[in-house]
């Protein structure tokens, strides 16, 4: 990425990877407390190149490689945050954040609460997640439920480059720790990013397609298939609304509830195994809050309750257009 | 990897300056600590012991829920705090209340955790003392981060990070020492080896020649010190702190001491150790030793001893009073500090509790 | 516990702690591949005394203390299981299982699948969980959702001593790894245990109280308040049915669905923070599967989305009778 | 803690028996391995190299998704496998395909993982080889468990547990060495220090004098060996295995080698290291060295060399053929091995897929 392109503002067409890189750069420029570190994020620029060029441009005190230990990375980030820094750490892949689980659940999530607000630990934990890239085992987990279930963490996930940029800027600026779930299969997808138009803050969902017959609720990697399904359904005369959550915690009840009440039908779409998941939460709260508006049960199209499959079989696990349309078809239209 | 391992090895025997009876150890010069420092340290030692006794009493009276005592380990507690400057940080565990008090934190605030009012009772920024850590060894990594932040800003901060012998087995211990070494973070890792992790004796915890030998594998110098010898501790820890401050990087210090009481009041130590073993440690008591030394030096007489006892009693009285004035914890606190602002979900949930409380009052 | 009492069979009145101890003894006697280990489980008998006397009676090769490292404990258990043993490991408290999270999610849960069945790792991971004992931070988490969301693990939790005994026997006999959630506040509660009457296998829920107006769905520590609430409601003329899940994974859809369909109303009760939890899952699947039978939305009485409170405030977090009755009252009886 | 630390320390320089040019190292007797063993080991070395080349080619042809090559590390690969007896266990990482093949596992089954058909392609029980581990250092603990089970049953099993230099930084490495030491588990921990963890060079991974020095902190003897010297490796690892089998407990061995290629084909090593650095290692190639040695000894001539090459080519051909006969993976496998039996939930979910497949066929 040439620094020419990187310094211009306005509207730019960027991949999500570039948008994230740009957000890190802009945050590092704006605030010298921002530090970026993790495994291979330095000279290599990260295995997905999200931190490309940061060490070269900001020096190896601002962006640096650590020894290979995720609990160490998050634990050290906590200390840095306690002492005035704003760490942004990369977990190389979803499943490799698990060694940091104790640090995340017992400290990152709880330190502010433990000290009644005296000690905040603002930090961003970046987690490339999900499948769809032909990755081998441990490289494709959708682990957002673990974090979303843990009080004290914000959990966000963009579905396009514009949101990726702005959610990252907001996450870094937030006084709370944010688990930033990056749908890795979207890293190379390109969208327009308006660098002058902040997205609404963390905690707001977005209706990304209007529709009147049913609402598809998606986030991160499932927003695209939801939109595709809506497009396909439109050709069959069915008008599907699509909501992109953007933020899992806090949850935008207002937007979601309003949306589902307007259509009376809802399908929740997520890649993670369905049991006790974020999709369960959405289905449960929508069922409760929209009860009298529902013409059909809220259903879910999620990953099966199996370990993520090997590359040659992963297409069975990922919620695709057909499966979404099947779910829509089953929404008791004849009742 | 150019470090020569010899410089990393601890001494064969723990550094000791005072024998159990308070006589200076033969063949070793006493460190030049100065009389004022020695007396201040001894005063803190007396107060620490008194604090432990007071907390113990409060547990028996049911006014503290639980107390993991550092009875017998007070020399470690005091030294860990006193070797630090105002700008330095202390990272204590649940067992290190006395160290936190020695650092100057209000003892009543320290006991908030064990009273069950809140998870931590003091503002960590005031005296630069992290909340007491329960998940073992996790705090050692935070210490590295705090130290590294200071390094990045060019501040002369040193961090004293405490843990027990058992905690050295956790993966986080390993990661903390390695990170500290690689980043040359100014951290002194001080392991209080009190021979037990709840019921598990050191021999089932490690087969290493000593816990201080663990430094070698990280390129971190290790040192062993008699954990009941206040002078040795002040000297070894003090040197480590100044070495770290001067840019020498982290150090690992193992203080060999003994947990004189059960793990906490909830524990039954008779299930796993003999009284005789405990008794053998009575004569190695850190207070007796220091008192004898100071008296022999003419630095302490009955009058001063009485004065110190009174100061300690005042602290104890403060603790008792503080625990009496029971301000009930606020339910709102449950929702106010999860995030910087309440989320809409938390606002709804707080309303549930508020409503319940209102209805209760109505009754 | 005298070994006299312990050797007798038939019906006995035991605390849940005694019942678990007895189950471990009987399993160790029946199968010498069964090993019990963890922190302080040897001479001390565990901080809750669940393993009391096992080292004395079976020797320190069968029940032993390990170094203090939870990832180590679970990781070593995996190897022992790979090589023919049946490990039963104790995590001292809920939050102290987090260091083992990677071993549990990436290996315990996945090794059978990874090897297409060639390498099973049968083991029981015992997790004392939940609040209600005045425990300080990190000693009262309800962590079942983390495990229930992870495919490859069975997750069970008893609500009385009889189930504690039999679920433990089944868990140890199972060829699958079982996360055994022990509601620590029930350790000292006493019930009759029939040592000759096996409970139905893992995966079966139980209707513990019949009722016709609404169904309370609970598990582990919330079964008791659910039963209390039902008792109180009965005096107000409302007939509440109570279902004890016993097994979270697998989930007994049949029993739960049948129950809710019979009453048309349901409240899910769990101690864990509610967001993206097991309670979410129950609410979501009941809402979906019983849609046409529901006279009111399925609601939840759960812990708030906050870190578990300190002892003096924990009563606010625990679902108690009043809060359950409030939820029942809100089930739109007037519609 | 009675162990004397001296016995735990590795030698100052890595053990080497062959210089880079194949001449015996001066001042050191060659270990008494026997000509048959040497030739077998060399044959395995040639096959391992050929396997690496073949896999590399298959990646370029798009028939393997990814390949983390052990090119340049073949001496470590071969020695780790060959020093084991039939009853022993091998715990490999993703990089250790060649070691798994050297242990006798069908190479086609080994590549199932990298082809993307399934997570692991061989039955671990057959040749006693654990599935190749991806989550770093986690497998070291499994190795301790397998070893301890054998100890409990009185079986003479030894476990060879492999990991990389980067993996030594993980907490699980620490816990595994400590558990092994405390339980005196018959495990040989063999670290292939290839100087990189993806892009991170050893100097940013550790400040220790050597990775073998990490043994000291556990009471585990450490040893360093030239990782491109097959004879030294066979000797050091073989001794460690027999020591463990005789009840001597675990050992830590660091093989100093070099990752000649990028981390995997997906990696771009030019971003973090100079070609010159790589080139300097070409002359330390493990094959050249061993070939020169065997020829000088008169154990290898052109004819035998040709024979070995043909055997290696046959393995390569088997791999190519095996990858050609593409049996598509079964969707049912997704649901059949999550548990011993499908749960009701999985039965429902499998039905969804079956239904989709049936409808697809109907079209
Ligand atoms: C990660 C973790 N595992 C288990 C525990 C439970 N626990 C609390 S104290 C303790 C023993 C600690 O021993 P040691 O480190 O020697 O410290 P000491 O109590 O002797 O001061 C244990 C096992 C814990 N707090 N954290
Ligand atoms: C717990 C964990 N964190 C991160 C990764 C991602 N990762 C795969 S290989 C690797 C580098 C490993 O280096 P090293 O241990 O030296 O082995 P080598 O690849 O050099 O053989 C990393 C970071 C992982 N597999 N597991
Ligand atoms: Mg201890
Ligand atoms: Mg390496």
Image (cartoon, coloured by chain):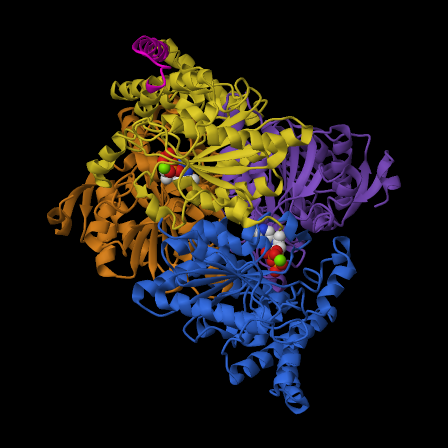
Chain colours: A orange, B blue, C purple, D yellow
- Residue D182, by quadrant, is top right
- Residue B50, by quadrant, is bottom right
Task: Say whether residue D313 is magenta.
Answer: yes
Could one spot residue B262 in this view of the protein? yes
Task: Say whether residue A317 is magenta.
Answer: no
Question: Seen in the image, is D177 located left or right of residue B186?
Answer: right
**Looking at the image, which residue is at 57% across and 32% down?**
D243
Q: Which secondary structure type mostly characterizes the magenta part of the structure?
A: helix
Question: Seen in the image, is A213 located left or right of residue A196?
Answer: right
In front here: D11 or B41? D11
In front here: D319 or A139? D319
Q: Position of residue B342 (x, y in %)?
A: 43, 60
Q: Position of residue A227 (x, y in %)?
A: 29, 33
Q: Position of residue B33 (x, y in %)?
A: 50, 79
Could one spot residue A327 in this view of the protein? no
User: From what the image shows, is residue B273 above or below residue A304?
Assistant: below
Quadrant containing the C terminus of chain C is top right
Quadrant for ligand 4 reads: top left
Range shown magenta: D296-320
Question: Seen in the image, is C298 located left or right of residue C243?
Answer: left
Q: Position of residue B52 (x, y in %)?
A: 66, 72
In front here: D44 or C305? D44
Residue furthest left in the image: A4
User: From what the image shows, is residue D112 above or below residue A168?
Assistant: above
């Amino acid at each position: 990425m040439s620094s020419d392109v990187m310094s211009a503002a306005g509207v730019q067409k960027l991949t999500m990877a570039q948008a994230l890189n740009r957000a890190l750069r802009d945050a590092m420029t704006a605030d010298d407390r921002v530090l970026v570190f993790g495994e291979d994020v330095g000279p290599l620029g990260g295995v997905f190149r999200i931190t490309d060029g940061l060490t070269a441009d900001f020096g190896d005190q601002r962006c640096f490689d650590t020894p290979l230990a995720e609990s160490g990375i998050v634990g050290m980030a906590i200390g840095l945050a306690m002492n005035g820094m704003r760490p942004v750490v990369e977990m190389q892949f979803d499943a490799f954040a698990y060694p940091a689980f104790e640090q995340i659940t017992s400290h990152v999530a709880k330190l502010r609460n433990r000290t009644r607000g005296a000690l905040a630990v603002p930090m961003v934990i970046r987690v490339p997640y999900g499948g769809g890239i032909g990755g081998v085992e441990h490289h494709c987990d959708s682990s957002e439920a673990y974090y979303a279930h843990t009080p004290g963490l914000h959990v966000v996930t963009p579905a396009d480059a514009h949101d990726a940029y702005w959610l990252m800027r907001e996450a870094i600026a937030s006084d709370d720790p944010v688990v930033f779930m990056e749908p890795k299969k979207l890293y190379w997808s390109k969208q327009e990013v308006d660098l002058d138009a902040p997205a609404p803050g963390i905690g707001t969902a977005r209706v990304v397609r209007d529709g009147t017959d049913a609402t598809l609720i998606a986030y991160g990697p499932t927003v695209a298939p939801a939109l595709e399904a809506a497009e396909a359904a439109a050709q069959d005369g069915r008008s599907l609304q699509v909501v992109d959550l953007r933020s899992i915690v806090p949850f935008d009840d207002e937007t979601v509830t309003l949306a589902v009440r307007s259509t009376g039908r809802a399908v929740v779409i997520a890649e993670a195994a369905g049991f006790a998941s974020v999709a369960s939460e959405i289905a449960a709260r929508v069922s409760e809050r929209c009860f009298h508006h529902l013409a059909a049960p809220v259903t879910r199209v999620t990953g099966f309750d199996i370990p993520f499959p090997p590359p040659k079989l992963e297409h069975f696990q990922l919620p695709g257009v057909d499966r979404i349309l099947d779910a829509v078809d089953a929404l008791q239209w004849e009742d | 990897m150019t470090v020569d391992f010899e410089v990393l090895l601890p001494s064969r025997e723990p550094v000791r300056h005072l024998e159990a009876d308070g006589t200076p150890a033969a063949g070793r010069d006493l460190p030049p600590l100065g009389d004022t420092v020695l007396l201040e340290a001894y005063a803190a030692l007396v107060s620490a012991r008194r604090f432990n006794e007071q907390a113990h009493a409060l547990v028996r009276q049911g006014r503290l829920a639980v107390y993991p005592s550092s009875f017998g380990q007070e020399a470690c507690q005091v030294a860990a705090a006193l070797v630090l400057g105002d700008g330095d940080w202390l990272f204590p565990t649940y067992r290190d209340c006395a160290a936190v008090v020695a650092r100057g934190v209000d003892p009543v605030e320290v006991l908030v955790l064990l009273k069950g009012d809140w998870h931590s009772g003091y503002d960590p920024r005031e005296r630069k003392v992290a909340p007491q850590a329960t998940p073992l060894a996790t705090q050692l990594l935070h210490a590295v981060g705090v130290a590294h932040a200071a390094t990045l800003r060019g501040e002369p901060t040193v961090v004293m990070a405490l843990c027990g012998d058992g905690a050295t087995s956790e993966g986080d211990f390993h990661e903390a020492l390695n990170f500290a070494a690689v980043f040359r973070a100014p951290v002194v890792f001080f392991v209080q080896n009190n021979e037990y992790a709840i019921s598990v004796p050191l021999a089932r915890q490690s087969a290493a020649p000593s816990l201080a030998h663990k430094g070698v594998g990280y390129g971190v110098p290790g040192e062993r010190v008699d954990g009941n010898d206040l002078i040795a501790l002040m000297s070894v820890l003090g040197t480590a702190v100044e070495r770290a401050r001067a840019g020498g990087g982290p150090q690992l210090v193992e203080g060999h001491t003994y947990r004189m009481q059960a793990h906490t009041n909830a524990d039954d130590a008779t299930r796993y150790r003999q009284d005789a073993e405990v008794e053998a440690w009575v004569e190695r008591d850190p207070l007796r030793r220091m008192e004898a030394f100071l008296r022999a030096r003419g630095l302490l007489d009955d009058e001063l001893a009485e004065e110190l006892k009174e100061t300690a009693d005042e602290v104890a009285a403060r603790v008792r009073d503080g625990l009496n004035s029971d301000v009930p914890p606020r339910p709102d606190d449950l929702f106010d500090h999860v995030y910087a602002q309440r989320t809409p979900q938390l606002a709804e949930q707080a309303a549930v509790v508020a409503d319940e409380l209102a209805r209760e009052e109505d009754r």
